[in-house]
Image: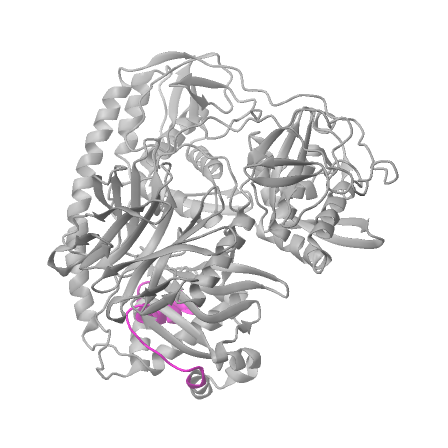
Amino acid sequence: MGKKFIILLVFMACGLMLKAQVDKDFDEIRKAQMKEFEKFVEQSQKQFEQYTDSINKEFSDYLRKNWTEFKVFAGVKPDTTPKPKALPKYNPVVDRIKPGAIPTEIKVQLMPTGQGLNISPVPITPFVQKEEPAESPGTSRNYDFYGTRFEFQSDPEMNGSLPAEIHNTTIANFWDRLNKTAYTSLLQQMNNARTSMNLNDWGFYVLVKKTSEAINPDKNYSRLLSWFFLTKSGYRIRIAYTDNQIALMFPSANTLYDIRFFITDNIKFYAPDFNQNVVLTYAKDFPGATRVFDMNLYSPLNIGDKYDARQFKFSFQNKDYSFALKYNVNSIDFYKDYPLCDLKVYFDAVMTPGAKESVFDALKPAIDGLSTADAVNLLLTFVQNGFAYKNDLDQYGKEKFDFPEEDFYYPYTDCDDRAVLFSYLVKELLGLKVIGVVYPGHVATAVSFPEEEAGDYLLYKGDKYVIADPTYINAPFGLTMPGKNNAKAGIIELLNGQSTGAQLASVWDKVNAGGGFAGDNRQNAAVDAEGNTYVTGYFKGYADLGGATLTSKDNTEDVFVARYNQAGNLLWAIKGTDDGIGRGYNINLGPDGNVYVGGSCEKLMAFGAFNIIFPKNKSGLFLLKLNKGGEVQWLKQADFDTNGKGGDVILYSKFSPEGEQLKSEVYPFDPNYEDYGIKFDGSGNVYYSASFASTLGLNVDKIALGLETGFDAIVTLKDETEKQLSANCDRVIAGLFGAISLIRLNDFSLSGKTIQQAFEKYNPGFKKKAPKVFECMGKLSIIKNNNGVITVQTEDKQSVLLDKIKITDGTKLKVTFLPGGDARLDILNGVKVGKAIIWFTLNYVKLFRSNGNVLFDYDSDHSQVTMNVQKDMLF
């Protein structure tokens, strides 16, 4: 995959060498702009540091006097209802579904299934750190983090010792001392590692814990370090002590079993590895520390690369199947250290890329061509017969739930493990909706089919789900396990991301075909409880979104918002009008049932009778509120004071449900911040965050747009590449960074035939070395940069296949440069990765300047693969 995508990027670079418009003085203009922006950032940083100093002192003073004794409770126990020692087997003569039989509707009781406390979500703010000298003193350390070597530098002043007696003054003094160290650099290193390893909250917690222990192995000292780092990373976390023992305690959005906790404000604070019954702690969070631990593994880990495999055999409809399925050994070790959580966490979890690829390679061909019913039964038969059974008490001596991938590792599985794996296979391979069905002492699943299917079923939120029990050996779907027919059942509602992703992809295909496009790929669509889809983006000139024709003013780009029903039919579409570039980026459904849309525009924005005008013909952000019928409730400007400067900053605003702007802040850009878009808190307030670095229309450098100044393109590219090398860019990838830095600045168009001529002239060996790639290049007829969006068109509008990459006509992407010089290419539409019948959407690509690595993020679960240009991609 990586090799061919690099070829595509090289193709773009060659295009720049052949045709572009670059002002000969663009470097001087760019330097002048950056000087002004750097001055603005410096002023903002001083204000942030003054605020940080103030809240640090306030918190320190609070720690010295406000501690209370809390009782620590024993951990919550999971359901210990005995599970069967042996499994019932389906008898096709006695147990089969009789023709004409009336299916049994299972009466469910929505029992509590241990899904955590209802903690109101709080949008994550960019967390500001103090500025430190570029050459801060550091001690180099490293350790193994589940197969990945984490190397870091830390200020020697972070290390030390604690007095013999621990009390609140000791902790306050520690806080004051750590605030005087150069801690920001280490926080950045840990957050960079979090991003590159795709860690969730628990993974980051373990990373911080292990890093603290590497600095100082003393348990009390390392826990204080972890508390400091996690607090500074924005987490709600408390430190507590008793009998000279320090405890680290945090709230979780999920129930954690067998872990002691104390309760404050009706919220449990869990204390892993702590056994005392009473602690002294405080009740006030550090200002800005609002993040609550979420134990879900929605995205696969990107740790280690050690895989092992297990062979499986089973028969279905008189056909034998045999294949090997992989599991990531490093991830298995990570799961072993995971606290036992809600069963829903395991149902919603995903597999690592290698394991997922092996599942698709083995089972996708087996179900290809089968009816949906037969495909579900094949997967059900595999899970029923592919694994030996043993309940957790006999295998582990305690209750344990398996993540889907763990079933390939452990010798035995029980009913909940099989239900988790089966639901994963159905969701991923078939894109069907699944729910978990929980009986006393037993777990099964139920599947929502596109057509009417016979069998025992239950109704949930308007959908019919047919029972499928992976522990009832050889039973087809539709049959309840003997002994459970009259038992009360609880429901676990699952994420069902593939089903939702397929629905969104279908709607976007219709929108793209009609001339509408996404402005961003992070939050450009939303689905309500009834299955309606809401999308936003932009169009130019004319768009037909499936029954509604929209026309833009003066053939410019305008914003659209549209709603489609569950069948994909358009219900309504509206547009916003501006005097330049208008683009919708984000859309979300509020707790009040209304629709909120965010985007950018130039000079003014109008939706019907509602309008806003930006002073002095500037561009800016807007926030729009609609009801579900598409009627505008209000339109507001997200007003920021940036002194008219662009650059790398994060814009963060807060609005009341009535549209009053309550907060407007500008933060230094953080490449690890991902909470962009529209969010809500428990009071219904609306938060909108965006960045100048990635928001098209706000920070498009127009120095060279439309200019016809002559220049030597090859020399220009050579000069830009040398600048990258002088800035410590890896030699293998420096030319690529030089090219995309210019691509981002300039409009250009070219034909694929011209690209082929360029290769024949400047790299004559390429055609012989990669004839298929060379041929495909001729089919990519035009590449055009239009106000920050690069469009790839194909010959005769046919998809072009570059090995494991499929490029469709009208593919759009945008380039963002990150602090430190790394680059991110967001794929707005049109590129898939995979092979044969297995294709996944490519979300974005990150290019790392210091080591020549390239990270590919793909599919709705954000699977990630990292490759090195020199070692893995070049011919």
**Is 446 part of what is drawn in magenta?**
no
Residue 55 percent location from the top left of the image: 22, 30
Please state the extent of the stretch shown in magenta in the rendering.
Answer: 725-754
Quadrant into which the N terminus falls = bottom right
The chief SS type of the magenta part is helix
Along the viewing direction, whichever of 97 and 391 lies nearer the viewer: 97
Total label count? 0
> Can the viewer see residue 328 in this picture?
no
249 versus 763 height, above or below: above
In the figure, residue 554 lies in which quadrant? bottom left
Q: Is residue 412 left or right of residue 871?
A: right
Q: Which residue lies furthest to the right in this view?
A: 93
Relative to 46, 350 lies left or right? right
Q: Quadrant of the C terminus?
A: bottom right
**Residue 575 in picture, x, y percent from top left:** 30, 58
Residue 749 in the magenta stretch? The answer is yes
Image location of residue 550, percent across then percent down: 33, 64
Rendering quarter of residue 323: bottom right
User: Residue 393: image x %, image y %?
Assistant: 71, 25
Between 223 and 415, which is closer to the camera in this rendering?
Answer: 415
Report the front residue among 838 and 760. 838
When the figure is inspected, residue 849 is found, relative to residue 128, above or below; the finding is: below
Q: Is residue 86 left or right of residue 525?
A: right
Q: Nearer the viewer, residue 859 or 584?
A: 584
